[in-house]
Image (spheres, rainbow, N blue to C red):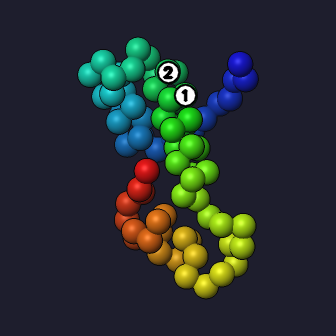
Amino acid sequence: MAKIELTIPEHLEMQVAQMVEQGEFLNREEAVEELLSTGLKAYKTSGPMEDDDEPGGLEDDGMMGHEDEYVF
C-alpha cells in the first residue's frame, strides 16, 4: 500500500478523531482511507463532466450546485 503525507485543516482532523473515538473506525488511518475512498467513488459518479469550461459549472455554484455544502 502506498504511503502519503497529508495536511488537513484542524476542523477536519477533529471530525476524524471524533469518529474514531465514537467507534466508527478503529483508528485514524482506517478513517482517512475509508472516507477518501467513499469521496472518490462519489466524485466519480457526480463529479465534473469532461467539459469543465461550460458556464454554470460546479466551481461557480459549489459542488452539486450547493454553495456551502458537499453532497455525497
The quarter of the picture where residue 24 lies is: top left
How far across and down, in percent of the image, does residue 4 sit? 68, 29
Q: What secondary structure is found at the residue carrying circle 1? A: helix
Q: Which residue lies furthest to the top in this view?
A: 26
Looking at the rendered image, the quarter that the N terminus falls into is top right
User: Toward the viewer: 51 or 32?
Assistant: 51
Q: Residue furthest left?
A: 22
Residue closer to the observer: 44 or 32: 44
Tell me, for residue 20, which label it has, or none: none
Where is residue 69 shown, x and y percent of the image?
Answer: 38, 60
Does residue 23 lie above or below 8 as drawn?
Answer: above
Q: Is residue 41 above or below residue 29?
A: below
In the rendered image, residue 9, in percent from the top left (x then y), is placed at: 46, 44
| Residue 23: quarter of image | top left
Task: Say which residue appears at 37% left-offset and 43% top-offset.
Answer: 11
Q: Which residue is drawn at 41% across and 41% down?
A: 12
Q: Mark 1 points at which residue?
A: 33
Find the residue positioned furthest to the bottom. Answer: 55
Please tell me which residue is depicted at 52% across the width and 43% down the height of the picture.
Answer: 39
**Residue 42 seen:** yes
Vertical position of residue 23 compared to residue 40: above or below: above
Q: Residue 66 or 51: which is nearer the viewer?
A: 51
Horizontally, is 66 left or right of 60 in the view?
Answer: left
Would residue 34 be found to the left or right of residue 68 on screen? right
- Could you tell me the amino acid type at mark 1? Glu
Mark 2 lies on a secondary structure that is helix
Residue position for label 2: 30
Q: Give the spatial CA distance, label 2 vs label 1.
A: 5 Å
Q: Do the residues labelled 2 and 1 touch (CB within 8 Å)?
A: yes
Q: What residue sits 58% from the left and 44% below the top?
A: 40
Q: How crowded is mark 1: few (under 14 residues within 10 Å), some or many (20 or more)?
A: few
How busy is the neighbourhood of tag 2: few (under 14 within 10 Å), some, or many (20 plus)?
A: some
